[in-house]
Amino acid sequence: NAGVTQTPKFRILKIGQSMTLQCAQDMNHNYMYWYRQDPGMGLKLIYYSVGAGITDKGEVPNGYNVSRSTTEDFPLRLELAAPSQTSVYFCASSPRQLRSYNEQFFGPGTRLTVL
Amino acid sequence: QKEVEQNSGPLSVPEGAIASLNCTYSDRGSQSFFWYRQYSGKSPELIMSIYSNGDKEDGRFTAQLNKASQYVSLLIRDSQPSDSATYLCAVNAGHSGNTPLVFGKGTRLSVIA
């Protein structure tokens, strides 16, 4: 199993540009999450999904959009990039089994810079 | 706003000593508690989960939970330089499996050889 994969690893965007961060998992996990991590800070939840076709906002959803058309994929869309979106973005997934639903497995991250 | 608090450190301990990392949380109804390790420039890695009051041991790691005091800790015995990392405490923010985790800002641990 590849686990959770993310592409790209690094990206530099200009202000106002848009992009999609890709995330895929091959563990048949129902739950998937997007976080951002700013230097010296913990993880902030952007969006999450409890299954295909179901998404919900986290703590910091403004400026982002998500979709979940399959169990495996959970892309994050940035529209009109702003310098405040410069961060490291992590995708994670977890199974639905009792008490395991929050044992999250993380992808390697995407380091995004907006100039 | 549900919160998880950790001392940011750095916490410095000599090699072979016990490292003690602490975490408090605000939501009394929280059910699940986790410790993640994050090396610099890498993604978080789950190292311990605990769901009931008391101690849970796994190798050199022991997680301790006290729901009455809203306190969870991680002990690392025989600390090694390879344990130097940031340790993130995470708590289930609600009362069901559909509520996501809330993470603390992490404690940076440095094990000195």
Image: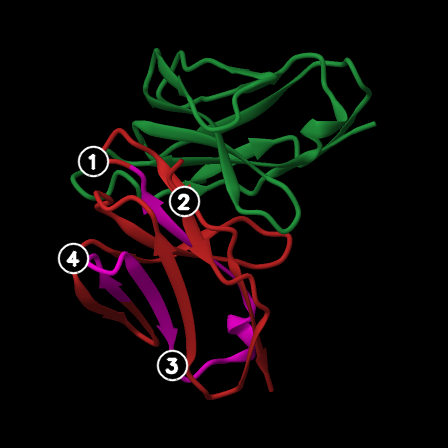
Chain colours: A green, B red
Which residue was labeled with disc 4? Answer: B52
Q: CA distance from mark 4 to mark 1?
A: 14 Å
Q: Nearer the N terminus, badge 4 or badge 1?
A: 4
Q: Could you tell me how far apart the alpha carbons at marks 2 and 4 are, in whole angstroms? A: 20 Å
Q: Are marks 3 and 1 in contact (CB under 8 Å)?
A: no
In percent of the image, x 55 and y 61: which residue is there? B8
Nearest to N terminus: mark 2 or mark 3: 2
Circle 3: residue type: Arg
Mark 3 or 4 closer to N-term?
4
The magenta-colored residue range is B64-93
Query: Which of the two marks, 1 or 2, is nearer to us in this view?
Result: 2
The chain under label 1 reads B
Per the image, label 4 sits on a secondary structure element best described as loop
Query: Badges 2 and 3: C-beta atoms under 8 Å apart?
Result: no
- Given residues A54 and B109, the one toward you in this image is B109
**Compared with residue B93, is residue A83 higher up or lower down, i.e. above or below?**
above
Position of residue B57 measured from the top left corner of the image (x, y, whole percent) = 25, 71
Tell me, yes or no, whether dots 2 and 4 are on the same chain: yes
SS class, disc 3: loop
Amino acid type of the residue that numbered disc 4 sits on in the rendered structure: Ser
Marks 3, 1: nearer the viewer: 1
**Which residue is denoted by mark 1 in the rendering?**
B95
